[in-house]
Amino acid sequence: MIVATLAFCGIVVSLMQTLIIPLIPELPKFLHASATDASWAITATLVAGAVVTPISGRLGDMFGKRRILILSLLAMVVGSVLCALSDSLSIIVVGRTLQGLAMGAIPLGISIMRDELPPAKVGPAIATMSATMGVGGAIGIPLSALIAQTANWHILFWVAAGLGLACTLLIAFVLPESPVFTPGRFDGWGAAGLAVGLVALLVPVTKGSEWGWDSPLTIGMFVASVVVLLVWGFYQLRTTNALVDLRVSARPRVLLTNLSSIMIGFAMYGMSLIFIQLLMAPAATGYGLELTMIQAGLALAPGGIVMMLLSPVSAKLSARRGPKVTLTLGALVIAAGYVVALFLNGAVWEIIVASMVISAGLGLAFAAMPALIMGAVPITETAAANGLNSLMRAIGTSSSAAVITVVLASMSMQLGPYSLPTMDAFRVTFLLAIGAAVASAVLAACIPTGGAAPSHAPAHGTTPAAKSGVPVA
């Protein structure tokens, strides 16, 4: 019941990432704003999710993972209700920011599984929870498109609020509080510094193509992010009860896993951005398959099913060969999927096959990353470490959105009044995704094997990480 409850919450939270993608063309009209301003409804969720994951993880380690999970879901409910009741851009951005705060639920759920489940069930449970990140995104587009095209767009947010409330009640009545926590003072200055640094980094990454990469605002925010994060790192190394234990994060096993996660995030988001445009582009482009939004979403939905079906396979592979092998294999399968797309993209079934291969690789990789992290950190820092790993993926997806948007915009053709990407532009994005996946595989192959997590004193009689059932090789 614990696994099913947390997996359901993971799917619901992941839905928030793709909830309003079908509304993108109509958002300026709905919100009475320019396209640039309306895009903040998407950017706000992305940035909030990236910022909150390491912070909510640390709060969960300190004050109880179940308690912070409930607060995260309540934030999503409140944000959804705000969006459902308003046509104002400012209110929608606030609501979408609150929805983004729920993204910390996935690493928190993974950590709860490690604390609560018997060792033999930890690996399969983590694989299932990890798969929800892709499953939610895969089913989100067709579900949102169906609601948006058949009902008032506000219904999307009422549905989100209802699902969030259902998750909150399930967590409150089904899930016990984890006995593993790390008492201490919360590092408020560290949280504030990380939030400012990440916002200064991720906002220009996601908006740079609109502002201009050489504009003073874009350059200034990048410079500010470097300065703030350097000061933040200096402070973290010299304070007790630091938000992020950088010494643990710098260990080769953790560092290389996080770097590999950035590349996985880059490759993952490419599928969402590229395939949907290929499927929906008009046939007059010479490559477009001219599907509706609902049809295109349904074409990509099998990828989510593949991810979920592969989760037990990933767990068994990690148990036998180690999560390092699983992560390396997953990255190579992702690269193979993009190779398929590079050469086979002229029919709907070819795109479906490519997306399923990529999703298979993502299923393997997503399940392996938390297993690698949890096998290398103290059990009392599980949630914070998983939150930081989720942040690395978020940086990868944000960078992917920026780079792919620039490529598709700069290599375009005119079709009547519309400017659309050329087929060469899509080929370049496929090559970028292949490069990111191969880089992830190389980084994963360099991860040192063996060696359990540091044997910090366990809290409240809990066992150290080495005995938690998480594979460490």
Image (cartoon, grey):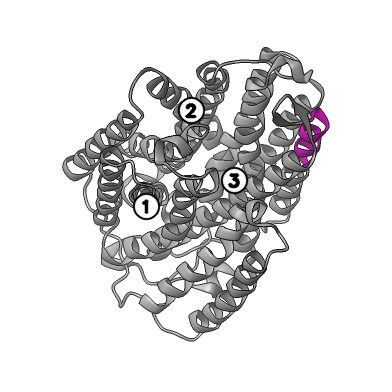
Residue position marked by numbered label 1 in the rendering: 90
Residue in view at x 51 percent, y 35 percent: 24
Question: Dot 3 surroundings within 10 Å: few (below 14), some, or many (20 or more)?
Answer: many
Q: Is residue 415 magenta?
A: no
Name the residue that disc number 3 marks: 323
Gap between marks 1 and 2 measured at Cα? 24 Å
Q: Which-is-in-front pick, marks 2 and 3? A: 2
For the residues labelled 2 and 3, the Cα–Cα distance comes to 30 Å
Identify the residue at the far left of this view: 173
Label 2 belongs to which residue? 141
Tell me which numbered mark, 2 or 3, is placed earlier along the sequence.
Answer: 2
Q: Which residue lies at the image location 74% right of the left edge and 36% below the top edge?
A: 335
Comes first in the chain, label 1 or label 3: 1
Q: Amino acid at mark 3?
A: Pro
Tag 1 near tag 3, CB within 8 Å: no
Q: Is residue 257 visible?
A: no
Q: Earlier in the sequence, mark 1 or mark 2?
A: 1
Query: Which of the 4 image quadrants contains residue 318?
Result: top right
Asked if one can make out residue 445 in the rendered structure from this viewpoint, the answer is yes
Q: Secondary structure at mark 3?
A: helix
Identify the residue at horizontal 40%, vertical 64% (top origin): 55
The reply to whether discs 1 and 2 touch (Cβ–Cβ < 8 Å) is: no
Image coords of residue 259 (percent x, y) = 65, 57
Q: Amino acid at mark 2?
A: Ile
Image coordinates of residue 16 in percent, x first then y, are 41, 39
